[in-house]
Amino acid sequence: MNSGGKILFDWHKNARHKRRSGPSEKAPWHFCATHFGARPFPFPSRRRAGNIEAMPRIAMTTFAVLKQPYPHLSNEDFNALEPLVFGASETSPGFIARATAIDVADTKWTNFGRDYGDWGRFEAPSFYTGGRTDDTDTRASTLSLWTDLASVKAYAYGGLHRQALRDRRRWFAQIPHKLYAAWWVADTEIPTWSEACRRLEHLDTHGSTPHAFDFRQPYDCEGRPQSAAHSPEVTHV
C-alpha cells in the first residue's frame, strides 16, 4: 500500500537514522499519522523502580508491485480499501508509528521525491524497475514501527488486513523478491526509507538473518534465532 499522502528492524553502528525525544525526556512523543490526519503517540516503555527502561522495537517494511498503476480502474477496490486497512493498523496492539510524508504533496499517487522527515526521503528497493510518476507508479510500500514481531503478525493475519491478503492476487503481480523485512531498532531510533530498502535487499539476497528477517525465521533483539510456525507471505503492513 502506498504510504505517502494516501497512507500501509539494528544494532549496527552504520545504521542511518535520526533521533527524536527519548522516553525519559519531557516530551516522549513520536508523531504518527493516518490517511486522515495525524496524532501524537507515546513510545511504549517499561517502568522499573520509578525509572523508565527503554525497550527495543521492531521496524517493518513491506513492498509489492501492482499489476497496473494506481489510477487504473482495476485498482478501484484496492484504493478504496487501503485507508480502512491502515486505519485498522492504527488501533492494533503493538503499533507505534508509520512513515508519513511531511511535505505538501504535488502528486496524488506516487511517493517518489517526497520528504518523510526523520524517516528520510522516499526510496524504493533497487530491484524495482517500474514507473515513478502518478500515471506509471506501481510499487506499494510501507515502513512502520511496532513493539514486537508478534503484534505485527497478529495484525497482518487478522481482521481486515487478512481479508485484503486473500484478494491480493487481484491487484498484485508475482515478483521474484521478498515482500517484507523486519529488524530490531533501539528505542529512540527511527528507520529511514533508505535503510528499509537495504534491509529488504539483504533479506532478498542472503535470506533471514539478524540483520533482516521474516516471520518464518525470526530473531530476537540479541540476534538469537527464534522458532516460528509457517507463515504465508505478507503483502502490506
Image (cartoon, rainbow, N blue to C red):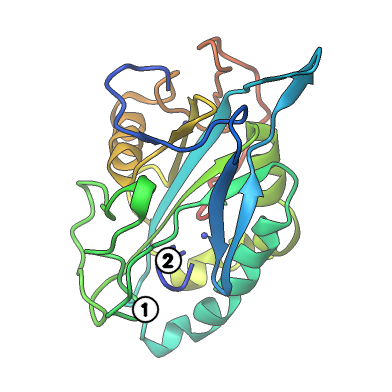
Residue at image position (52%, 55%) is 236
> Where is residue 201, by image quadrant?
top left
Q: Which residue is mark 1?
A: 70
Neighbourhood count class around disc 2 (C-alpha, 10 Å): few under 14, some 14–19, many 20 upward: many
Q: Residue furthest right?
A: 49
Give yes or no for contact between labels 2 and 1 (Cβ–Cβ under 8 Å).
yes
| Residue in front for this viewpoint, 67 or 237 | 237
Residue 237 visible, this angle: no
The reply, left or right, for residue 124 in relation to residue 216 is left
The reply, left or right, for residue 129 in relation to residue 28 is left
Percent of width and height locating residue 46: 74, 23
Q: Which residue is mark 2?
A: 2
> Where is residue 40, by image quadrant?
bottom right
Which mark is in front, 2 or 1?
Answer: 2
Percent of width and height locating residue 205: 28, 30
Residue at image position (35%, 56%) is 116
Image vertical order of residue 97 relative to residue 219, above or below:
below
Image vertical order of residue 194 relative to residue 219, above or below:
below
